């Protein structure tokens, strides 16, 4: 019989379940109760962080607003087939991601 090991620091539970392990879609929030994280090729189950009491700073709100405007700009470009076809993309990137980056760099 194995003895239980009591850890003093907070840790995440590691899983060897193949339903969670190794699948790209298995990362992230699954329910509002837990989240799956991959570190060093190993999958861990962790409690979802409670962000309800976190108050964003003025600078964080400003960057969030900038990114929202960049997404609107990119969606506007990809919704027009003529603009989408003529838009110069960055190597290895899509029109959408290139437009977001171009918008953010133009500020």
Image (cartoon, grey):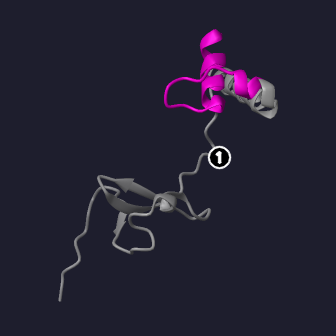
Front in this rendered view, residue 106 or 68: 106
Task: Note whether 31 is above or below 73 in the view shown.
Answer: below
Query: Which secondary structure lies at badge 1?
Result: loop
Q: Residues within 10 Å of mark 1 (few under 14, many from 20)?
A: few
Q: Which residues are magenta?
A: 83-107
Q: What residue sits 22% from the left and 71% below the top?
A: 5
Magenta segment's dominant SS is helix
Is residue 62 something one can see in this rendering?
yes
Where is residue 105, by image quadrant? top right
Q: At 71% across and 27% down in the image, what residue appears?
A: 85
> Is residue 106 located in the magenta-colored stretch of the structure?
yes
Residue at figure coordinates x 31%, y 56% from the top left? 41
Q: State which quadrant residue 23 falls in.
A: bottom left
Q: In x, y percent, where is residue 16?
A: 33, 72
Picture layout, residue 79 above or below residue 23: above
Q: Position of residue 25 (x, y in %)?
A: 52, 60
Quick check: 95 left or right of 76? left
Question: On the picture, is 28 further left or further right than 73?
Answer: left
Quadrant in the picture for residue 86:
top right
Residue 4, position as x, y percentages in the image: 23, 77
Q: Which quadrant is home to the C terminus?
A: top right
In this orientation, which residue lies closer to the viewer: 56 or 40?
A: 40
Q: Is residue 97 magenta?
A: yes
Q: In the displayed structure, does residue 80 sit left or right of residue 5?
A: right
Q: Is residue 90 left or right of residue 19?
A: right
Q: Quadrant of the N terminus?
A: bottom left
Residue assigned mark 1: 52
Front one among 45 and 53: 45
Residue that lies at the very extreme toward the top in this rendered image: 107
Q: Residue furthest bottom?
A: 1
From this view, report whether residue 63 is shown above or below residue 2. Answer: above
Q: Is residue 60 visible?
A: no
């Amino acid at each position: 019989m194995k003895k239980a090991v009591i850890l003093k620091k907070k840790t995440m539970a590691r899983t060897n379940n193949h339903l969670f392990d190794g699948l790209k879609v298995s990362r992230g929030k699954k329910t509002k109760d837990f989240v799956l994280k991959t570190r060093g090729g190993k999958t861990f189950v962790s409690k979802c962080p409670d962000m309800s009491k976190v108050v964003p700073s003025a600078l964080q709100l400003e960057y969030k607003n900038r990114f929202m405007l960049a997404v609107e700009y990119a969606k506007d470009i990809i919704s027009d087939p003529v603009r989408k076809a003529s838009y110069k993309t960055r190597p290895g990137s899509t029109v959408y991601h290139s437009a977001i980056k171009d918008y953010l760099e133009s500020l």
